[in-house]
Amino acid sequence: MKYDTPHIEPADRVNEIKEYYFSLKLREVARLNAEGRDIISLGIGGPDRPPHPLVIDTLCKEASKTDAHSYQLFRGLPELRQAFSDWYSDRYGVQLDPDTKIQPLIGSKEGILHISLTFLNPGDGVLVPDPGYPTYTSASRLAGASIHPYRLSACNGWEPDFEELERMPLDRIKLMWINYPHMPTGPPATPELFKKIVDFGLRHNIVIAHDNPYSFILNNTPLSILQTPGAKDIAIEMNSLSKSHNMAGWRVAMVASNSRFIEWFVKVKSNVDSGQFRPVMKAAVEALRLPQEWYDGLNEVYGSRRLIAEDIMKELGCSFDPGQRGMFLWGRIPDSEHSAEALADRILYQARVFITPGFIFGNEGERYIRISLCATEDRLREALNRIKNYNNTQKQN
């Protein structure tokens, strides 16, 4: 029997989102590399160096055990939750009960969707920073929420304008995403900023979701919003080992809040995934116990790379704030450039260097580019030389 071609449409939520920019662009970079173009990627914030040898050794040792490969508890190993609790106590001065106020995650990107599904009903409003991490918007749309971008600008130090926030339809807002040190713009958190945000959330019954993966990168004063008085009543914070411990592909993160929020969160998470690989959790425990020397060594490397990234920005005619933190450098393109996307594409195809145009982070990023520090000094210097050679050729023409 012959059938007509079936007409099937995806769920409406699929039409509400686009494929992730880097998913698309990295396919293009891969195609160029397959053609022998040797593209230097300064786009993705994926650490290029390995974790501590002790962490790798622990993974290998634990993976060789015959009883290591079964399903694990949804709440994660008790020793991992304890290690996260000790880490927060040692590094941030925040006390968290490991049994009721901490939940390990299979990466914080996944946690963004879990938080969205935990707190948002269809139609609920979400405050999303502009510029900001695109997943805050896409995860909110997958949850059926209404997106309310709030503007961050250079003239305000890339902090929220609280007068503008107070004029938004706050009776319809359920959740607010924040992220400091901010990605992509780089300003660090301050106790004063966190106090304003917590006060805002408490006054308007808005859950504050703080994404905090960059607090140890080129930053001598790591802060948690949970240090702020009253924050545990209204805030939920994610942290990750991806950046701070070079474990991006391992997918190890955590969420911390009050016991009620965590209880709700676990209801969602336990229906979505089946927990983490036991050897990965055991290795993460060792990572969380690393001494200050680990962080110092990490930042020595990023500090040297940052200097070359600043030279690249200058060669591109971009201006930037030298006080930025994290593993990126954010710069404003010259007024003579048509757009950040046009500049990024020109540098990709002509100089064979991949940089990120700021428009992917929101309207306020339209005139900016971002350079990742996740490339060796040699590759960064080669990128600088390629851009210099391209600029010299353009001048001669």
Image (cartoon, grey):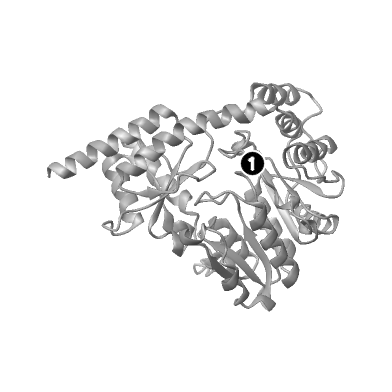
Q: Quadrant of residue 117?
A: bottom right
Q: Provide residue 131's location: percent of width, then percent of height.
A: 50, 59
Residue for badge 1: 221
Give the camera-side residue of 323 and 186: 323
Q: Is 124 situated above or below 107?
A: below
Q: Provide residue 55's location: percent of width, then percent of height.
A: 68, 26
Q: Is residue 270 left or right of residue 351?
A: right
- At horizontal 64% and vertical 21% (from top left) the residue drawn is 53
- At horizontal 69% and vertical 49% (from top left) the residue drawn is 238
Q: Is 395 situated above or below 237?
A: above
Residue at the left extreme of this rendering:
397
Q: Is residue 338 left or right of residue 277?
A: left
Q: Quadrant of residue 90?
A: top right
Q: Dot 1: within a 10 Å radius of its alpha carbon, few (fewer than 14), some, or many (20 or more) residues?
A: few
Residue 36 appears in the rendering: no
Q: Is residue 210 left or right of residue 328?
A: right
As helix, strand or loop, the secondary structure at mark 1 comes to loop
Residue 273 appears in the rendering: yes
Q: Provide residue 114's location: percent of width, then percent of height.
A: 70, 56
- At horizontal 39% and vertical 33% (from top left) the residue drawn is 380
Q: Amino acid at mark 1?
A: Thr
In which quadrant is the N terminus drawn?
Answer: bottom right
Q: Is 106 situated above or below 15?
A: above
Q: Is 267 situated above or below 347?
A: below
Give the camera-side residue of 103 and 177: 177
In which quadrant is the C terminus drawn?
Answer: top left
Q: Provide residue 269's location: percent of width, then percent of height.
A: 75, 53
